[in-house]
Image (cartoon, rainbow, N blue to C red):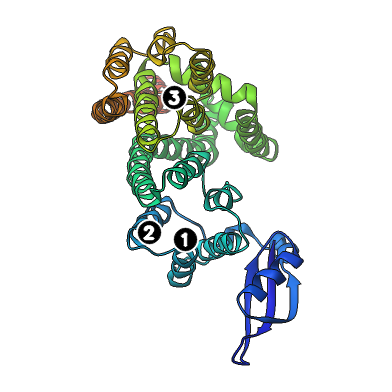
């Protein structure tokens, strides 16, 4: 909860600001610990909920990477967690991140551990992030944990941007083509239909289909366009359900073109996450559980849950992976070598580098296949449209001659 307060400091100066706390009493206690005498305090949470989220400051992944590096530097210099978070909150330009960091500092000041304070903000700090910090607290190496996190988040951000780049271009081209086609059906084809009607000639089947489609768009647009929007919205909502996510993720893991891409994404994230957490002292079962929580694909998420259950029952990590058909044999063999030599973290680090290169190749392959496929698809669409117009015109000119 966010509270707006007016208070007087020890020098007698009046000050106004905001503070985040679990309750009004907790907020007052925090302010008193800072040496402030509270004059007024008001809950702003209800007012904030009425504001449009569109206008709120957004926290970008890059902001979290920079913040993690700054925290690591401050810890390495011997600055306490409370002072570090207060300093970064005061110096940060992003208002939302400033508010979140101030809330973390307030929690630390009230006696909450750093990892628990971060866990109260799941939208900003993932379970992976929180557990890495917790491991740093237990080992006394918080600065190393935050450096690991900054490096990992940087790699993860780069991975997401590459995948996004690979899919944005074809989506833009297809979307633009659909808009142009709809415009043709609504504005151009009806004029051609009037011309053909005046001639009274027999039209080819392809022309009849195109003219019929155009007539549906023109005459029933009050039904067609709302139906398309509602249909798209319902499909989006269905994809958010458990059944919808499973179906979409199954398609991702089975479609020939995209199967290799999404497998490489999973393997890169698996090796990178496991290496980062094991290097920070997180137990292997906990590492697998956290990795399953941050994997986007339901199929791979369930795979890791099965592996975690087997490892927890005493099965070796490599053997549990071997029993999963979606995990390539090379990864299983490398993990087995890491277990036998006691260098699993080092092996996983090398695997993460290897699969990152493989992912770059997979992305290039997908882009290389999508572009000609789009050209063929767009060519067919334009060909059908042009043929529906030219064939009857050719027939009319032949009849006249």
User: Disc 1 and disc 3: Cα gap in Å?
Assistant: 71 Å
Foreground pick, 332 / 73: 73
- Name which of mark 1 and mark 2 comes first in the sequence: 2
Q: Do the residues labelled 1 and 3 touch (CB within 8 Å)?
A: no
Q: Residue 388 carries which label?
A: 3
Vertical placement of residue 150 versus 234, above or below: below
User: Which quadrant of the structure image shows residue 223?
Assistant: top right
Foreground pick, 204 / 331: 331
List the residue tagged with mark 1: 81
- Is label 1 in a helix, a strand or a loop? helix
User: Disc 3 and disc 2: Cα gap in Å?
Assistant: 71 Å
Label 3 packing within 10 angstroms: few (<14), some (14-19), many (20+): many
- Is label 2 in a helix, a strand or a loop? helix
The picture places residue 360, in percent across and down from the top left corner, at 26, 31
The picture places residue 2, in percent across and down from the top left corner, at 68, 65
List the residue tagged with mark 2: 75
């Amino acid at each position: 909860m966010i509270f707006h307060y007016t208070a007087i400091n020890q020098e007698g100066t009046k000050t106004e600001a905001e503070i985040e706390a679990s309750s009004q009493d907790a907020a007052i206690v925090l302010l008193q610990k800072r040496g402030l005498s509270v004059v007024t305090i008001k809950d702003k949470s209800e007012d904030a909920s009425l504001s449009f989220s569109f206008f709120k400051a957004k926290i970008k992944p890059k902001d979290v990477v920079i913040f993690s590096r700054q925290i690591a530097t401050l810890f390495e210099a011997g600055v306490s967690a409370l002072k570090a978070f207060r300093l970064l909150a005061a110096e940060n330009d992003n208002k939302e991140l400033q508010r979140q960091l101030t809330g973390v500092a307030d929690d630390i000041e009230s006696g909450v551990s750093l990892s628990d304070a971060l866990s109260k903000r799941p939208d900003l700090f993932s379970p992976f992030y929180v557990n890495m910090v917790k491991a740093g607290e237990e080992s006394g190496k918080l600065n190393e944990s935050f450096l690991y996190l900054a490096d990992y988040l940087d790699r993860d951000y780069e991975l997401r941007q590459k995948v996004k780049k690979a899919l944005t271009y074809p989506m833009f081209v297809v979307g633009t083509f659909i808009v142009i086609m709809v415009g043709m059906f609504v504005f151009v084809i009806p004029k051609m239909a009037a011309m053909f009607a005046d001639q009274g000639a027999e039209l080819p089947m392809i022309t009849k289909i195109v003219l019929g489609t155009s007539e549906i768009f023109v005459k029933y647009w009050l039904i067609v366009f709302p139906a398309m929007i509602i249909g798209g919205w319902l499909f989006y909502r269905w994809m958010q359900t458990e059944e919808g996510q499973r179906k979409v993720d199954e398609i991702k893991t089975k479609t020939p073109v995209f199967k290799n891409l999404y497998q490489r994404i999973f393997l890169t994230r698996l090796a990178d996450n496991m290496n980062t957490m094991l290097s920070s002292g997180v137990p292997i079962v906990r590492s697998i559980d956290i990795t399953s929580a941050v994997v986007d694909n339901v199929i791979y998420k369930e795979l890791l849950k099965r592996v975690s259950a087997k490892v927890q029952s005493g099965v070796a990590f490599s053997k549990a992976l071997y029993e999963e058909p979606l995990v390539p044999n090379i990864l299983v063999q490398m993990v087995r070598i890491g277990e036998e030599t006691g260098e699993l973290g080092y092996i996983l680090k090398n695997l993460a580098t290897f699969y990152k290169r493989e992912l770059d190749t997979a992305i290039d392959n997908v882009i290389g296949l999508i572009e000609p496929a789009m050209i063929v698809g767009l060519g067919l669409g334009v060909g059908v449209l042009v043929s529906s117009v030219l064939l009857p015109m050719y027939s009319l000119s032949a009849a006249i001659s």
